[in-house]
Image (cartoon, rainbow, N blue to C red):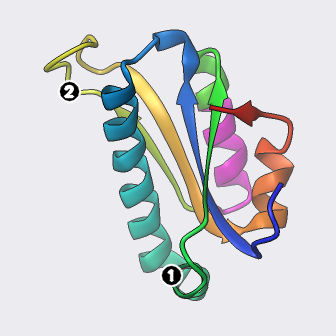
Amino acid sequence: MSNFKIKQVIVLRADLKMSPGKAAVQASHAAVSSAEEARRNHFLWWKEWIESGQCKIALKVNSEAELIELERKSKDLNLPTALISDMGLTELKPGTITVLGIGPAPSNLIDKITGSLTLY
């Protein structure tokens, strides 16, 4: 939970045991991609998020299935999302789903989906 009205959540797969650098890069892909989706489809959310400091929260799940379910629930609420799969150039096999970006969007909507997750 946060005090920001608009936030972005980055959900990483803890089961992959990515190195800190790999996790940072994958999280960055998700942050940029879901922010771009918000800018295109939810401009007012995006604008408020930019102007209020771009609040981001990093959370974790333990499986690909959990990540895909979070994406489905986010899309059901019409939230901007970005599901990231790795190119397989370094640590992971090509196509490995690593992270989900949700938002920027209203915190109360995101919390309905990710409020029970723990910090990464």
- Residue 86: which quarter of the image? top left
Along the viewing direction, whichever of 37 and 90 lies nearer the viewer? 90
* Dot 2 alpha-carbon crowd within 10 angstroms: few under 14, some 14 to 19, many 20 or more: few
Measure how far apart labels 2 and 1 are at the Cα level.
Answer: 29 Å
Dividing the image into 4 quarters, which one contains the C terminus? top right
Can you name the residue that lies furthest to the left here? 89
Q: Amino acid at mark 1?
A: Ile
Residue highlighted by disc 1? 50
Q: Amino acid at mark 2?
A: Met
24 sits left or right of 92 in the view = right
Q: Is residue 66 magenta?
A: no
Q: Position of residue 74 (x, y in %)?
A: 68, 50
- Residue 106: which quarter of the image? bottom right
Q: Is residue 74 magenta?
A: yes
Q: Secondary structure at mark 2?
A: loop
Q: Position of residue 54 (x, y in %)?
A: 54, 71
Residue highlighted by disc 2? 87
Name the residue at 37% across, 59% down: 32
Along the viewing direction, whichever of 67 and 10 lies nearer the viewer? 10
Q: Which residues are magenta?
A: 68-79
* Dot 1 alpha-carbon crowd within 10 angstroms: few under 14, some 14 to 19, many 20 or more: some
Q: Secondary structure at mark 1?
A: helix
Q: Position of residue 78 (x, y in %)?
A: 66, 63
